[in-house]
Image (cartoon, rainbow, N blue to C red):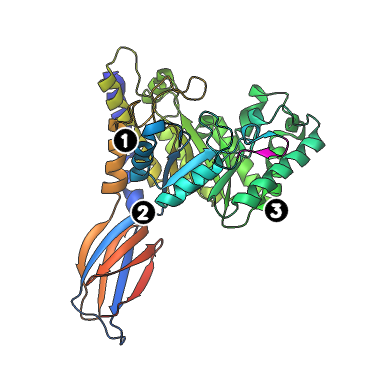
Amino acid sequence: MKELLEKYRATYEKLEPAIKENTEKYRKGNFKLRLTDKTGAPLRNADITVTQKSHKFDFGCNGLMLGQLGEKNEIYEQEFAKLFQLVTTTFCWSITETEPGKFRFEEGSEEIFRRPPADRVLKFAQKYGLKAKGQPLLADSWYPKWASREVETLKKQYVNYFAEVAKRYDGKYYMFDVTNESNFCLERTPDFPLLKMGKTEYVKWALKEAQKLFGSKTKLERNEASEVNAGKDADFYFAENKEILAEGIRLDTIGLQFHFFNEGAAKHHLNNEYLALEEIYGKYLKYCELGIPMYISEVTIPSRFSGLTREQGEQIQAEMIEKLYRLWFSVPNMAGIIYWNFKDGPAWNDEGDCLGCLLDTALCEKPSYQVLYQLIRREWNTELTLKTDEKGEASFRGYYGTYDILVDGESCEVDFIGEGQEDIMIEA
């Protein structure tokens, strides 16, 4: 393992100059504050405190254990909100409409492990000022047993489901995955009826139907499995999305999963044999040519490695996460990173076996959590004090996001999300 880590570090060091340059170029901007008193005169020599509250870039995680941890629910929520600004949950059809017309949207609905009602997740997001994302509306392995196996009838049922979700959550949930892992459903569920339309065609159909129902305040994404980060699968995903956009179909963003659910995959990554750093970085830059944002939509990095102690495994997880997040954060069109499971313990199938979470089973912060906290809330966060000049102006360079500006005891909130100037009126 030591040799693998040394090789990994050497590979990262080759990319580090470009990562640092792009982070500075694409994640920060030059801002000017112009302050006046209530008469419009410049507010000279005023002391200003600039504090970044949140990022334009979406750092998030799934909240699939919300409300399912008994007396530890509050700890889970606080640890989540301390680090992240986006929470995602599943809208898989089979567990959301368990019977025709019976939806599990409301609090008090049937409790299903790792499938909290959507209202609960939205309430949590509103409580802490987070964005909420839904995943996915259409997934081949998550359509109900009661649904039709006849294509045209199934399409109508899907549209009805899309409509119910849109009616309740359009403009409230920030984003929805419309489709999930369509490029791999032929191998997984070859009997999925919509495959008769063709893989690409059913994605186009779903996006077209979704765009009729969801307004511009809700982003529409398609989500794909980890393989699209590299190799021929990345080339196909790029070409497919380019075709979709060329046809004028609304596709607001694309998602790329990044899961290592076992130590074997992680070791291959460290050895530059699977999703190698140099290759994925090149593919991300290629994806930027699509001209739309992209997300690393699901992330799992293990901390369990055979032959290593728990502490050693957790340190390896933390180092991998740090390097990957630095790389992802530097990609020009990257709009966010969503870690997958937050707390170690049972999860879907065997994905919990790798201990790939940021909190341990006791909800204590692992080194990976602390690494992300230092990046998101410290290194990539702007806090400073300024003084206005004779024109009542003060300039600074900072990370894009939402700021609190405090002047002589008066505060206001300002969004710095692009190059520009903010004129802030202060009644002295």
- Kind of residue at disc 1: Tyr
Query: Where's residue 172, x and y in %?
Result: 55, 53
Q: Is residue 412 magenta?
A: no
Disc nearer the start of the sequence (3/1): 3
x and y, in percent, of residue 309 in the image: 27, 16
Query: What residue does disc 2 label?
Result: 54
Image coordinates of residue 50 in percent, x first then y, are: 26, 63
Q: Where, by quadrant of the figure, is residue 30 drawn? A: bottom left
Mark 3 in CB contact with mark 1 (< 8 angstroms): no
Q: What's the mark number on residue 360?
A: none
Quarter of the image where the C terminus is located: bottom left
Front residue (pair 198, 120): 120
Task: Determine the residue positioned at 29% across, 52% down.
Answer: 381
Q: Which residue appears at 65% of the width and 32% of the height? A: 94
Residue 321 vs 310, above or below: the answer is below
Q: Quadrant of residue 142?
A: top right
Residue stretch rendered in magenta on the structure: 100-104
Tell me which numbered mark, 2 or 3, is placed earlier along the sequence. 2
Residue 364 vs residue 68, the one in the foreground = 68
Q: Which residue is the site of mark 1?
A: 369
Q: CA distance from mark 2 to mark 1?
A: 18 Å
Residue drawn at 64 percent across, 53 percent down: 214
Main SS of residues in magenta: loop
- What residue is shown with label 3? 212
Q: Amino acid at mark 3?
A: Lys
